[in-house]
Image: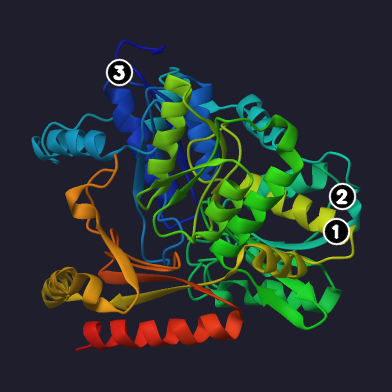
Amino acid sequence: NSVTKNGSVAIAYDSRIKSDVFARDAAAILAANGIKVYIYKELMPTPMLSFAVRHLKCDAGIVVTASHNPSKYNGYKAYGNDGCQLGLEAADYVLSIMNSVDIFDGVRRVDFDTALAEGKIEYIGEDVIDAYLAAVEDRRVNRDIDMSKLNVVYTPLHGTGNVPVRRVLSELGYDVTVVDEQVEKNGDFPTVVSPNPENAEALSMGIKLCEEIGADLILGTDPDCDRVGIAVNTKDGMKLFTGNQVGALLVDYVIKMNRAQLNEKSTVIKTIVTSELGAIIAKKNGLNVIETLTGFKFIGDKMNTFEREGNGEFVIGYEESYGYLVGTHARDKDAVVASMLICEMACYYKNQGKTLVDVMEEIYKTYGYFLDKLDSYTLKGIDGVERIRAIMKEMRAKGKDLLPGIAKVNDYTVGIDDLPKADVLKFVFEDSSWIAIRPSGTEPKIKVYYSVKGENKDDAQKVLEARQGVINSIINA
């Protein structure tokens, strides 16, 4: 499929400081080496790069972004010809080549504008953007709802979601009010401490606007628009949702609306640190559930296996960190399609006189109450790295003795099922509650995930606090 004998690469970038410069530099170097480049003319969401790689039949893809991290960061995501972020083996192979060359010696680059004029670099056209948005809109699971009944507040948090999310929602007839102060593309993210929709603070301006105008809910997407956070307006005020809660709602809704299309191959994919609630809903409705390591590239890899081997049909994939995908148009989490389906779901239930909070309570009554929490501990410097290693070693040594009621300990360093080896420990309790502990792959942190099942919220909260107390005492010793 390669356009040149050296192949072709698609490139996208977000609103972060110098993202556009880094993207153009990458294009200029690739072009100088005889590689055809397709680059978006302006900033675009990460899922639109995943789509473009597949749509344009490219050999690889690049997104310049640091996702939801604070403004001082930027980064570089590499994709294969399947539109999925490089897996562990591919990444190691690329890294081995990078380490074998001098980064300053013999670098070839051309002038970007010259390469553009010569056709070595080509802007990705509106036709590709339109094809992506059509693919997203095609993922609707209920087309008979009057969308104008729902009032939505949306914030792109100074990032790439502004145009595609608003365009999809407006084309489908939703009443959308945008947070004006957060529309500007700005890598300093001046109105938030961190542009992470997992943090309540990032949505605070949207929540205030939602209350002022009496909107039904607020959606906030991160700078590269692959994650989305929500808060819902209720008679008791605004209620924030976790990624696990939204994931469970989407699993329940998509199954409910798509029942006629589901079969014995229909599968939900989640990560090992994502709550069991969505998995329980899926299994009770006869779907298969597959677990992967943390990171959407592992979910994308399973999707590719389904496509290649025909041994499964992808229904929805999600992770607790606010990333969701419905549909096979991309191989990465997609906040554009997720925003659309969250609105559709909220509108469907509004027509029944319910908010998403009401529906969440119904799900808890049916499947059990789940309380999920993520605690991150920052341990900086060389000492921090050593401390993180020591903590993981101590947790491994404790095993089932860490807490009463632990039925098994999954140590992913030895490889479990067909998953790649990873430095993750998961303590699974007899009632399907669990605690997972892993060092962060991108920051000097150790992360502890809790999924607690209880009779009700108060019961679950007590269990959670007791377990947090034990883990805190070990980490802060």
Q: Name the residue under label 3.
A: 34
The answer to whether residue 276 is visible is: yes
> Which comes sooner in the sequence, label 1 or label 3?
3
Q: In this view, does 376 lie above or below 2?
A: below
Inter-mark Cα distance, 1 to 3: 50 Å
Which residue occupies 60% across, 68% down?
Answer: 368
Q: Can you tell which mark lies on residue 126? A: none
The answer to whether residue 379 is visible is: no
Q: What element carries label 3?
A: loop
Task: Report the amino acid beneath label 2.
Answer: Met
Q: Name the residue under label 1.
A: 150
Quadrant holding the C terminus: bottom left
Q: What element carries label 1?
A: loop
Give the crowd class for mark 2: few <14, some 14-19, many >=20 residues within 10 Å: some
| Left or right: 310 as drawn, with respect to 353 | left
Give the crowd class for mark 3: few <14, some 14-19, many >=20 residues within 10 Å: some
- Viewer-side label of 2, 3: 2
Task: Report the amino acid beneath label 1.
Answer: Leu
| Left or right: 424 as drawn, with respect to 23 | left
Q: Is mark 2 on a helix, strand or loop?
A: helix
Q: Which quarter of the figure has residue 159? A: bottom right
> Which comes sooner in the sequence, label 2 or label 3?
3
Q: Do the residues labelled 1 and 3 touch (CB within 8 Å)?
A: no
Residue 256 percent across, percent down from the top left = 73, 46
Q: Which quarter of the figure has residue 100? A: top left
Q: In this view, does 437 lie above or below 463?
A: above
Task: Report the amino acid beneath label 3.
Answer: Gly
Q: Mark 2 points at which residue?
A: 147
